[in-house]
Image (tube, rainbow, N blue to C red):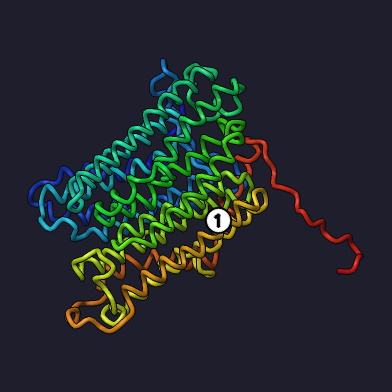
Amino acid sequence: MSSLSLVTVIGAVPLVGAAVVAALPEGLVARAKHIALAVSVLTLGLVVVMALQFDKNGPQFQFTEQHHWIEQFGVSYAVGVDGIALVLIALAAALTPVCILAAWHDVPEVGRREQNYFALILVLETFMVGVFAATDVFLFYVFFEAMLIPVYFLIGSFGAEQRQYAAVKFLLYSLAGGLIMLVAVIALYFAGPGGPDGFLLSNLTGLHMGVGAERLMFLGFFFAFAVKAPMFPVHTWLPDAAAEAPPPVAVLLVGVLDKVGTFGMIRFCLPLFPDAAKWATPTVIVLALISIIYGALLAIGQTDIMRLIAYTSISHFGFIVMGIFAMTSPGQSGSTLYMVNHGFSTAALFLVAAMLVKRRGSRRIPDFGGWQRVTPLIAGVFLVAGLSGLALPGLSSFVSEFLVLVGTFARYPAAGVIGTLGIILAAIYILLMYQRMMTGPKPESATTIKDLTTREAWVVAPILVAIIGLGVFPNLVLHVVNPAVKSTMTVVGVTDPAPKVAPAAEGTSK
């Protein structure tokens, strides 16, 4: 038995906050969003405390806690964080208050409906913390599936015109992946030592199992994570869900929840099934490259701004998966950093696009034009977010994308060359979008439209700080995740390729 850890407290705070928000009496319902914002800020403060106490030179998993849950089946409540889980929990905690503030007027009527909206966001935050912190495979699966519930209702009840279709499609794809993964989870338990701690990640790592069984279990886990990521060809739910969801929900969906897929590949697919992962690597690299190019090409052809941003994420996730399965330190460190940077850049794009859509009353890119003369501050934020998305040097995504490509080049030069085409395509879809929406003469019909409001400035300011700060100081994340990456590579049994050009001998001329 373990004492209550800070991770459990961080997960419990938004859940308690959600219960308070949902149970507010009629006289206090107008305070629902204020309480939700305060709870999310408190959660962020606790995550900052945990980050400051995290020892990057200490044990891999810290702030651990374990209690037997379903002892007969070997299930434990076991949580802990390594560097990778820490930065992703921090991403979720940072984006949640931003999204609550952005959602301030999403529900026009004050009452039970508004209470439910903000309570569901807080419940979702609890599940996001739990899925990244779980060190018991079955507990991870529980959080993995539980996240579907608040997202389904947030999209289906509060989304746009096609919300029901998008919510059901999201649910069916996710359930299909989750059910296949459940079969693999049960098979993994019977392949392991069993007992009351039979699902602990530490007890299942390094198992010796048959080649066929290992490959089948790897495929079960990988399929679920590929759906969540999302990767080609199981990606089609994302554009519908992201376009029809309320923009703050789309931010949490694409910016944080989809990272569970790529996080799961690092946390479970590689350490639990190292030989199968090596066997599947060529196919996974090909699928990642298809995602990079395919997602970018579809983004170029979009006229709906929300769907365009969603398709760019399919391309970006291709980079993340490619870096993970390149099986190099720069590739995996870059992929983890990419998860964080993509979360912030995509959040900025979705939220600023929502501000523009609300003012124009349309999501169609051709309905804009000349808006940098109408809303210059919003246009400036939109440009910075877009430049981060195309990996401009000095902004956050550049370092992560560079590390992914360097790590891929080291082992798979051809894949690295093809992957660089994604950078060129990213420049095309971002700059074309900005040109069509922002440049040109000032539209006469938009003369009375206001620029960035004070609340909107508070929404975008912390995201811009993160985009610029992580672009200048990427080691804030890299120093934390590198030990976890090193541990993963040791478990998998791979090392970085030796340099092809030997260093000059001491004393020789260059």
Residue 213 in picture, x, y percent from top left: 54, 22
Residue type at mark 1 is Gly
- Mark 1, secondary structure of its residue: helix
What residue do we see at 30% from left, 44% from top? 124
Tell me if residue 278 comes above or below residue 451 in the rendering: above
Tell whether 286 sits left or right of 369: right
Left or right of 371 on screen, residue 338 = right
Residue annotated with mark 1? 419
Q: Residue at x 10, y 56 (%)?
A: 109
Q: Quadrant of the C terminus?
A: bottom right
Name the residue rendered at 63%, 35% in the picture. Answer: 491
Left or right, residue 482 beside residue 439: right
Looking at the picture, does residue 212 appear above or below residue 177? above
Instruction: Return the x and y of residue 497 as percentages of the image width and height.
Output: 72, 47
Q: Picture coordinates of residue 352 (x, y %)?
A: 31, 66
Q: Quadrant of residue 107?
A: bottom left
Q: Residue furthest right?
A: 507
Count of marks placed on residues:
1
- Asked whether 200 or 280 is in front, the reply is 280
- Judging depth in this view, the residue of 177 and 41 nearest the camera is 177
User: Left or right of 23: which side holds 226?
Assistant: right
Q: Residue at x 54, y 68 (%)?
A: 472
Rendered view: 348 above or below 1:
below
Is disc 1 surrounded by few (<14), some (14 to 19) or many (20+) residues within 10 Å? Answer: many
Residue 453 visible in the picture? yes
